[in-house]
Amino acid sequence: MSHKPVSLTEFVLDEQRKYPKASGDFTLLLIQLAAAGKTIASHIRRGGLGDMFGKTGKKNTSNDEVIALDEYSNDVLVETLTASGQVHAVASEEMDEIHHVTKHTGEYIVFLDPLDGSSNTAYSITVGTIFSIYHKKSSMLARGIEQVAAGYILYGTSVMFVYTSGGEVNGFTLDPAIGEFLLSHPSITIPKTGSIYAINEGNALQWDTPTQEFMAYVKKQSFSARYVGSLVADIHRTLLKGGIFLYPADTKHPHGKLRLLFEVNPIAFLIQQAGGVALCGMDDPLAIVPSSLHQRVPVVLGSKEEVEYYRSLL
Ligand code: AHG
C-alpha cells in the first residue's frame, strides 16, 4: 500500500479520468484557484508585517469597508482566473460589476468572496475565500442548484482547500514544506446531530419568535456556543463537528446579512453534499432565483437534526 499522500492536483486529475469526455478545463480551473489561495495565504501569514490591514477608504456594494487585503485577494483571484483561460466571467463580492473575460475565454463562471471575514485579519483570526462555479450556459443570476462545484479556502492554523463538485466533499491541507494541498479529509460527512450553535447573539433582541424559541431549546440542551464571525471558520467547524449555524433575518437585518451568490449558495451546496441541511426561511437556498448580484438572504444550516428542528418552529 502506498503511503504517498494524494495531492489536490492528483485528486482532481483522477476525478477527471472518470469522465472520458472531460476536457481538463475544470481541473485546471480548480488548480488555478488553489494557486491563488496559496498566494493569498502567504500574504495573510505576514500579518502586521505588511501594509495589508489598512483601509482603502472605499466601501463595496454591500457597504463593507474595503481593506487593502480585500483588494489584494480580489485582484489575485480575478487575475489568476482570467489568465487561466478557463473562465467566461467572474463576479466578486468586492466588485460592483461582473468581469467578463474577453481574451482566452473559457467555459465557466466563477463567483467569489475573495476574503470573507476580512475585518478579522487585523487580529490574526481565521478568514477564508469562498468560490462557486457554474457553467457559462447558466445565467449570471442562476439558481444555486446549477452550481458545478463550490468550496472554500480556509486560512487558519492550517490552510485548507475544501470543495465538492457534487457527490463527495473532500478537504486538502496545505503542506507548507512542499507547497502542495494534500488530501487530509476524504469524503467529509457532517454528523447528523451536534451540540454546538453559532449565531451572533448580539442580535438577540432583534430575532423573530422561531429563532428565540430555537435558541431557548439549544440552551436547555446545554449546547456550546461558538461564533468566530468568519463564515468559513464557523462553517468548517460545523461541517466537521456538526451543530448549527444561523444568520437569520432580524429587525436589524431584514433580509439577513449573508450574500446569496457569494456566500450562501456555495456553503449550502457543500453542506447538502456532506449530508446536512440548508434553509433560507422554509426554502432550500439553492432553489432561489436570485434577484440581484449582491442579494442578501437569511440562512440556517448544519446538521440535519438541528436544522429540521429549527424548520419545525417556523
Ligand atoms: P465581512 O466579509 O464583511 O467581514 O463579513 C463577514 C461575514 C461572515 O464571514 C460572517 O459570518 C458574518 O459576516 C458575521 O457577521 P456579524 O459580524 O454581523 O455577526
Image (tube, rainbow, N blue to C red):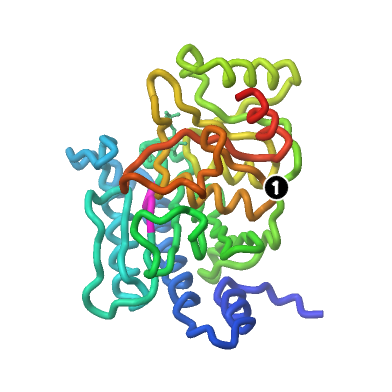
* Label 1 secondary element: loop
Taken as a whole, is the magenta stretch helix, strand or loop? strand
Q: Which percent across, then down, holds residue 263?
A: 44, 46
Question: On the rendered structure, is 40 left or right of 66?
Answer: right
Q: Is residue 110 above or below residue 310?
A: below
For image coordinates 34% across by 71% down, the residue present is 87
Considering the image in quadrants, where does the C terminus appear? top right
Q: Which percent across, then down, holds residue 275?
A: 69, 50
Give the quadrant of residue 311.
Answer: top right
Query: Residue extending furthest left?
Result: 57
For image coordinates 64% across by 46% down, the residue present is 239
Question: On the rendered structure, is 275 left or right of 154?
Answer: right
Query: Residue extending furthest top?
Result: 205
Considering the image in quadrants, where does the N terminus appear? bottom right
For image coordinates 53% across by 83% down, the residue present is 22
* 18 falls in the magenta region: no
Question: On the rendered structure, is 61 left or right of 5?
Answer: left
Q: Which of the two residues, 257 or 36, is positioned nearer the viewer here?
A: 257
Give the quadrant of residue 90.
Answer: bottom left
Question: On the rendered structure, is 145 left or right of 61?
Answer: right
Q: Which of the two residues, 54 or 248, is positioned nearer the viewer here?
A: 248
Q: Which of the two residues, 229 or 178, is positioned nearer the viewer here?
A: 229
Query: Residue extending furthest right?
Result: 1
Span colored in magenta: 111-115
Q: Which percent across, then down, holds residue 10?
A: 60, 78
Query: Residue extending furthest bottom?
Result: 20
Q: Quadrant of ligand 1?
A: top left
Amino acid beneath label 1: Ile
Q: Which residue is mark 1?
A: 190
Q: Which percent across, then down, holds residue 131?
A: 44, 57
